[in-house]
Amino acid sequence: MSISIPSGGHISYAKKKLWGTAGKVRGLKVHYFDFDEKEMNIDVDGTAKRVKRLEKQGKRIKLFIMGASVFLFPEPVKEIREIADEIDAYIHFDGAHVAGLIAGGKFQDPLREGADVFTISTHKTLPGPQGGAVFSHNKYAEVLKMAAFPSTMSNHHLHLVAGNSSS
């Protein structure tokens, strides 16, 4: 479940008919959050009802993708976490467009609010070369490492890896 493109969502999370990566390339069945246009944010109550309707139809939500290409306000991660816990689903927070605000402590903190995984683009709101980063809780570390290398990444460009000192 993700935010629709007209509500600020990214094409990556769009349905097959819109040629979204999730739908067209990955073959995933995509459903959208209910969106409150007046508040310009996810409608939690409407989304909870939608999830229940989908469950009754045998359509189980396995992943909630939060964050968007265009969003003005923090998203209700804590509230969606409650829904996700009821159906044993995960939450991914795409922070590519607000990473600088999150790093500076001026926006929400997705992992502490309930997201399982938080991803960013290093070049959109942080100074530096084009790249990305994945943050998660320790319990997901090994599965994320295996998903990244060698299946989707061939190398990690050591010149882009931040220095790490044990002292």
Image: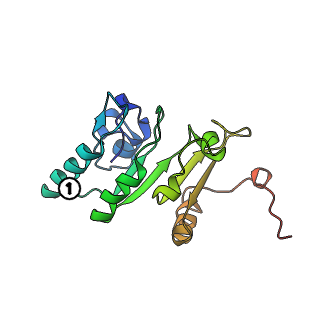
Q: Is residue 163 left or right of residue 1?
A: right
Q: Residue at x 23, y 52 (%)?
A: 51
Quarter holding the C terminus is bottom right
Say which residue label 1 marks. 59
Label 1: which secondary element: loop
Q: Is residue 150 left or right of residue 64?
A: right
Residue 103 at x, y = what percent? Answer: 65, 46
Q: Residue at x 60, y 41 (%)?
A: 106
Q: How many marks?
A: 1
Identity, as a three-letter code, of the amino acid under mark 1:
Lys
Residue 67 at x, y = what percent? Answer: 46, 42
Q: Nearer the viewer, residue 12 or 126?
A: 126
Q: Is residue 53 left or right of residue 125?
A: left
Graded by Cα atoms within 10 Å as few (under 14), some (14 to 19) or many (20 or more), the crowding at tag 1 reads: few
Q: Residue at x 33, y 64 (%)?
A: 85
Q: How is the image coloured?
A: rainbow
Image-quadrant location for residue 104: top right
The furthest residue to the left: 56
Q: Residue at x 58, y 58 (%)?
A: 135
Image-quadrant location for residue 90: bottom left
Q: Is residue 7 left or right of residue 155?
A: left
Q: Nearer the viewer, residue 132 or 46?
A: 46
Answer above or below: position of 97 versus 105.
above
Answer above or below: position of 161 versus 142.
above
Q: Nearer the viewer, residue 136 or 11?
A: 136
